[in-house]
Image (cartoon, rainbow, N blue to C red):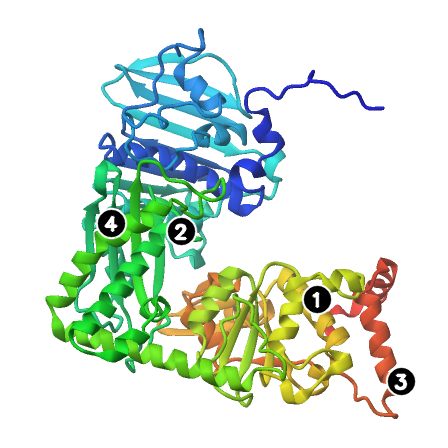
Amino acid sequence: MNKYDASEVLEGLEPVRLRPGMYIGGTDEKAWHHLPIEIMDNSIDEAVAGFAKKITVNLIDSKTIEITDDGRGIPVDEHPKYPGKSALEVILTTLHSGGKFNNNVYKTSGGLHGVGSAVVNALSSQMDVTICRDGYEWHQSFSRGKALGSITRGNATKAHGTKIKFTIDDKIFGENAVFKPVKIYRMARAKSFLTRGVKVEWHCNPALITEDMNILSDTTFFFFFFLADFVAEKIESKPKILPKIFSGSIDFPDDMGHIEWALSVLTDENGAASDDGFFASYCNTIATIDGGTHETGFKTAITKGLKAYGEKVNNKSASLITSDDVFDSVAAIVSVFYKTPQFLGQTKEKLSNPEIARYTENALRDPWEMFLASDPKTANALLDFVINLANARIKTKQVKDIARKTPTKRIRMPAKLADCSKHGVEGTELFIVEGESAGGTAKQARDRATQAIMPLRGKVLNVLSNSDERFSANKELNDLIDIIGAGTAKDWDDSKLRYEKIIVMTDADVDGSHIASLLMAFFYQYMPQLIYGGHLYLSCPPLYKLTCGTESMYVDTDEELEQLTNGKYKNKKVEISRFKGLGEMMPNQLKETTMSPKTRRLIRIDLPPKTEEGLEDTEKTKTLVYDLMGKKPEFRFKFITEHAQFVKDLYV
């Protein structure tokens, strides 16, 4: 019998190493990329408080990053509660320490939970800290949350600030954990446009940057008009309704913080809603990717203000407008700075303070109404544009309610589905896309009228090696059955099919092929009629983009690339971009290469015919599918062993 007592106590940062998911949400790529954000947030807090003007982000190698600021520098004197230890050591080795719980030190902060730097230290194999403060340089090193020695005083200096260099720990994240330069670059750039008066220098080891990344190894970010500058750069010469960006900054009551914002409304070339819009929100420079109360307040203020303007000009249709109509085609950013933010989740992805919704709405109401009143021509054009979107939404809903309901109830479609608007099946397509990032790009690249997008999260269940109970409990696959609409093999009804083509769109790599295989196995097992009817397809995204002078082309295979570089383009200056995944492609590239019926290639999935003459072939197919995808790995091993020598000619 196991002994149960209180003899074992986790000390220092041991709880972080034991349960990293409790502090940074997991140990995946998203988690280790969150670590430099925690360190940079401390530098941003110094800048927001007015003590720092420059922050430097230096990606030294694929696992090591250095972040420097010219703020006050972390205190280095002896900590009053921990004799013999510097304040620096206590801050980096003890949870919930430091100055962020004291509003006299920071009015607003991105790290109010007080664990950021210490957690990064705990999850780093090495951390080296240099402080410039009190007339000297100070140095201290750590490893996996523990000090490797006491703080030491270095050379005299008039400088001030903090430099933290750390290496992510393979024991926590695995040997394959590496920083992606593009992610760190975007993080540094985002922090610069969110922070008034601060320059962010970016440096990256050139060996880490490939041609397809489209980033510089050395640059400086500085936005004079902050959010408005960023939005203006993003929308460039795109068609828009507002001749100037609606932007500003207003303090909240009682010195609780302030809000900054920038908003434009885009159209396509025909004056319809644009797919190039975006809406991003931040709190204390932290990206709140799941939104929150500041987004709610912002959207409410903009929507109510436009409806109020409609009432003033006696446009009765303004009452139809909803927030979704208004924000369907915006390019907008809202950033709040708040003394006591509350987040859902340790990684702070959703702001939950209820009062911030009210503060934000009240702050935006008057400036937005004045903005509209100052330019009636633009305000009327915006109102008409949004009312048209509202009418289209209502009409589409009415059509779907009639055409897509069962005799007893209308099926509620999953929230992740971006459905097409066309009534009827002919010409419609459902793209099943690998990953949320690629799904977002596909939504921008699609034809809204005929193309629907359903993003999947990672690898789907292998239905041929799992029980029916596990399949029944799998929400994603059951969502697909509802979306496609015609039922499963036992109760299939062609007349209820909601799309003419079902297109599996995955990355052009091994993982993408695996996901495509799992989906094909699912359709083979539960919807063979979909395949027999010629409705199931695989997309063919390219591997490379080859550019020579003004000429460019997309290349599908390594063999084709080799032929071109050793043939037509031999001895010529050629730029080769490798597409690592669908999410790395720009929307126009994805549209041109993989989604537009005019320029894409599709592979239709076929099965031997279900006739008396074809029964033998059908049985062979079933045996092969179950051997390759079923529960017994020895069958797969046997197949691979027997066919490996023919792999170049193997098509299954």
- Looking at the rendered structure, the kind of residue marked 2 is Gly
Write down the quadrant of residue 109 in the picture: top left
- In what quadrant of the picture does the N terminus appear? top right
Indicate which disc residue 616 carries: 3
Q: Position of residue 553 (x, y in %)?
A: 45, 74
Kind of residue at badge 1: Leu
Of the numbered discs 4 and 1, the one sitting upstream in the chain is 4
Q: Is residue 304 left or right of residue 340?
A: left
Q: Is residue 470 visible?
A: yes
- Whether tag 2 and tag 1 are in contact, CB under 8 A, the answer is no
Does label 4 or label 3 sit earlier along the sequence? Answer: 4
Task: Mark 1: give few (<14), some (14-19) or many (20+) Cα within 10 Å.
Answer: some
Amino acid tagged 3: Glu
On the image, the x and y values in percent for residue 238 come to 27, 71
- Residue located beneath label 2 in the image: 292
Q: Residue at x 46, y 70 (%)?
A: 443
C-alpha span from label 1 to label 3: 24 Å
Q: Secondary structure at mark 3?
A: helix
Marks 4 and 1 sit apart, C-alpha to C-alpha, by 46 Å
Q: Quadrant of residue 396?
A: bottom left
Instruction: Tell which tag, 2 or 1, sits nearer the viewer.
Output: 2
Q: Give the residue at mark 1.
A: 518
**Horizontally, is 6 left or right of 437 in the view?**
right
Comes first in the chain, label 2 or label 4: 4
The residue tagged 4 is 260
Task: Please tell me the numbered disc located at residue 360.
Answer: none
Residue 607 sits above or below residue 523 on the image: below
Residue in front for this viewpoint, 51 or 469: 469
Q: Nearer the viewer, residue 307 or 630?
A: 307
Q: CA distance from mark 4 to mark 3?
A: 69 Å
Residue 92: x and y in percent read: 45, 23
Label 4: few (<14), some (14–19) or many (≥20) C-alpha neighbours in 10 Å: many
